[in-house]
Amino acid sequence: PKAIVTDTINPYPINNLSSFQFVIKPSSPWLWGSASMPALRFWHKFDTDSLKDGGYIEMSYDGGTTWINIANTSDVGFLGGSIPNDTILGGIYAFTGKSKSFNNSGWTCSQMLWRGFCPYRPSTPDSIIVKFSFNIDNIETIKEGWMIDNIGFGTTGCPFGVHDIYSR
């Protein structure tokens, strides 16, 4: 009931780029140690014009100055579920087409972790900005879009969870 969705009534609009972002910052620098890596998990469902429109995830280690697609870096490993291994226009790795699930609901879980973060290494960032984007071309396709729910963050070996944010 509190999912992030492109539109609840209409198909997604053409010529649109929508995104949201959040910052991941550990409560203790030791949470990003060699035995405990940052991890992100979320449930999602998508129905887009395959290889044209889609949703993708980027990250920034420098406060949003530069962005890296999570599918284009060895920093992020996928633990299972849906992986953005197709590209949309512009060669962007994204979730595109129609999501598949074992129970035919379309809902799938994606899980990823950041490798090699260690508090005593100077290259380990103090925070990560994660941005979810949905990019649409100029052709009307009458598709549903992308729905994201149950976003959770934790570290390997620690619980996941992000509180729901209410907007008025």
Image (cartoon, helix red, strand yellow):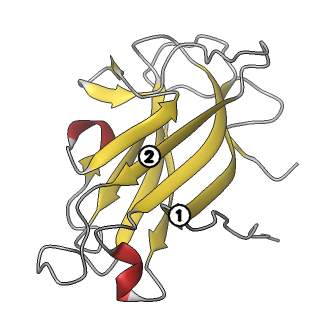
Toward the viewer: 57 or 119? Answer: 119
Instruction: Look at the image and tell me whether residue 99 can be seen.
Output: yes
Q: Which residue is at 22% across, 38% downward? A: 72
Disc 1 is placed on an element classified as loop
What's the residue type where badge 1 is placed? Gly
Assign the C terminus to one quadrant of the image. Answer: bottom right
| Residue 8 picture quarter | top right
- Write the residue at 43% across / 55% down: 131
Q: Nearer the viewer, residue 59 or 145?
A: 59
In percent of width and height, residue 124 lies at 20, 74
Confirm or deny contact between disc 1 and disc 2 (CB under 8 A). no
* Image vertical order of residue 129 relative to residue 8, above or below: below
Q: Is residue 155 left or right of residue 70?
A: right
Q: Is residue 137 above or below residue 150?
A: above
Residue corresponding to mark 2: 112
Q: Residue at x 43, y 89 (%)?
A: 28
Disc ID at residue 157:
1
The x, y position of residue 160, in whole percent, is: 63, 63
- Circle number at residue 77: none
